[in-house]
Image: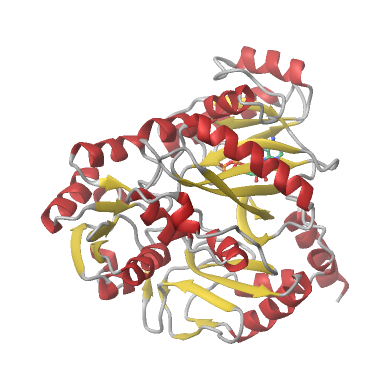
């Protein structure tokens, strides 16, 4: 078993990994930028090493600085969290070369899944349904037009290296394709340093449904059921729940089995998430795989009672899945997560600054993952997620009541947050009825604007 782990991340997920390590009796090393000197991961880790100035490229994304810290602290393993270096196959390779275990899948699997059009092809080959789409990267605007004619409008142009909803454009007609193609290309090149694009059929009003899996290095894979993440704005998740109201036990079983077989064949190891879109006929189509722990992993933990981060560490140390899970997975109840971002709740502009008051709610079935605290400062350089409020209830209705009261009792002052937005979503009749496709937020804003105008 590992003796010491370095956490190559910051904020709530760094703290989450520290929690898992403490429970496993593993020492931790936090790395931090100058902007995070007074952060909770620095306070709660056994050791902390400053790796540079606030800018991401000079600190958390600076591979030589991260590896130097790991060597100085003499760690056995690195947990990358999510975002940052978590899906960087080169970083995983450097770790391997330095004899430090990277807690995640082998670099070649990360590389395959990181090129989304290649991941689509691999899944198609394994028999997992995918949406009609282009084969390989779109070489030119002309090729994009050809593919769009074959697939049929509407289509969606997506970045091969995509993430966070960037480099994506919905195209409804041939006339608008050239401009949107070039816009997606420059956005992808700026965001990912790679302007490669591919194309898929655009599904109207889909639900985003994803499956959590765990895999050991001996070829055994388990599915831990699904999360529904359809409440999104600008293709980014805002609220997630498990189970989905649209997945029957039979569908869950079918998809779970298919994924376990496919991922075992691919040689997948550690935690992973396979994302699907569900159309109005309740058919699921693969869109991408994330080869890391997800932001929304707590909803799965709440319903399955499996600690996914501890599982990641145990699996990376060579444990068998059987030993990690110790019995069958029996989901219980319903869980919801609200992402609390430091953002203006309507304009979605970032809101950095000092938190002047902070009251996290508690009580039965409530969990908060956060590194925020009263008098703490939210720096302007990083992701806006500052807390995840997660609840579990015996069913969806209890989970909704519990989340509503927890949101009412969650006080954050000094900065803007998405708490008021979540309060309104939880009270919304469409949300309560489970009508949660990916266009929910658009309709929700339109409804609210209408009500405001009528007042
Ligand atoms: P990213 O990696 O940037 O998050 P994804 O492929 O995971 O990109 O897609 C993010 C979101 O974009 C989905 O949850 C969905 O809302 C929307 N989306 C992606 N592909 C399609 C599609 N083919 N049809 C409709 N919506 C899509």
Picture layout, residue 372 above or below residue 257: below
Q: Which residue is farthest right?
A: 454
Q: How is the image coloured?
A: secondary structure
Picture layout, residue 434 above or below residue 168: below
Residue 329 appears in view: yes
Left or right placement of residue 91 versus residue 454 in this view: left
Residue 207 appears in view: no
Where is residue 160 shown, x and y percent of the image?
A: 52, 30
Q: Image quadrant for the C terminus? A: bottom right
Which residue is drawn at the image coordinates 19% and 68% (left, top)? 47
Q: Which is nearer the eye, 259 or 279?
A: 259
Where is residue 406 shown, x and y percent of the image?
A: 63, 82
Instruction: Answer with the quadrant where ligand 1 appears in the image.
Output: top right
Q: Which is nearer the eye, 452 or 393?
A: 393
Left or right placement of residue 216 versus residue 329 in this view: left
Q: Image quadrant for the N terminus? A: bottom left
Choose top left, top right, bottom left or bottom right for residue 123: top right
Choose top left, top right, bottom left or bottom right for residue 444: bottom right
Where is residue 203 shown, x and y percent of the image?
A: 76, 37
């Amino acid at each position: 078993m590992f003796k010491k782990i370095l956490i190559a991340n910051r904020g709530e997920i760094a703290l989450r990994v520290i929690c898992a390590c403490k429970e496993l009796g593993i020492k931790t090393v936090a790395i931090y930028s100058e902007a995070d000197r007074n952060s909770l991961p620095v306070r709660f880790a056994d050791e902390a090493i400053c790796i540079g100035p606030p800018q991401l490229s000079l600190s958390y994304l600076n591979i030589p600085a991260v590896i130097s810290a790991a060597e100085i602290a003499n760690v056995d393993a690195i947990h990358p969290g999510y975002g940052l270096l978590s899906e960087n196959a080169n970083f995983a390779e450097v770790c391997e070369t330095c004899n430090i275990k990277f807690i995640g899948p082998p670099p070649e699997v990360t590389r395959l899944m990181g090129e989304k059009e290649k991941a689509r092809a691999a899944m198609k080959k394994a028999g997992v349904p995918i949406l009609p789409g282009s084969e390989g990267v779109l070489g030119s605007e002309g090729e994009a037009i050809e593919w769009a004619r074959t697939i049929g409008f509407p289509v969606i142009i997506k970045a091969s290296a995509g993430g966070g909803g960037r480099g994506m454009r919905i195209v409804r007609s041939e006339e608008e394709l050239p401009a949107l193609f070039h816009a997606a290309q420059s956005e992808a090149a700026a965001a990912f340093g790679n302007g490669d694009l591919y194309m898929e059929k655009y599904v109207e009003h889909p639900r985003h449904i994803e499956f959590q899996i765990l895999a050991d290095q001996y070829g055994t894979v388990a599915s831990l059921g699904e999360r529904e993440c359809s409440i999104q704005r600008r293709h980014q998740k805002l609220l997630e729940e498990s189970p989905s109201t649209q997945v029957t036990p039979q569908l869950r079983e079918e998809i779970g089995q298919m994924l376990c077989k496919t991922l075992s064949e691919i040689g997948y190891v550690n935690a992973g998430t396979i994302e699907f879109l569900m159309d109005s006929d309740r058919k699921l189509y693969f869109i991408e795989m994330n080869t890391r722990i997800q932001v929304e992993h707590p909803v799965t933990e709440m319903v399955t009672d499996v600690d996914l981060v501890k599982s990641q560490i145990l699996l990376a140390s060579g444990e068998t899945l059987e030993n990690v899970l110790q019995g069958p997975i029996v989901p219980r109840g319903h869980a919801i997560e609200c992402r609390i971002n430091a953002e203006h709740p309507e304009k979605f502009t970032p809101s950095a600054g000092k938190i002047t008051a902070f009251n996290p709610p508690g009580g039965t079935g409530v969990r908060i993952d956060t590194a925020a605290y009263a008098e703490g400062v939210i720096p302007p350089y990083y992701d806006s997620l500052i807390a995840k409020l997660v609840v579990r209830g015996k069913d969806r209705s209890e989970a909704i009541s519990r989340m509503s009261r927890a949101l009412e009792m969650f006080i954050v002052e000094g900065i803007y947050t998405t708490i008021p937005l979540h309060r309104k979503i939880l009270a919304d009749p469409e949300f309560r009825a489970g009508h949660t496709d990916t266009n929910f937020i658009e309709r929700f804003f339109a409804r609210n604007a209408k009500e405001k105008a009528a007042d």
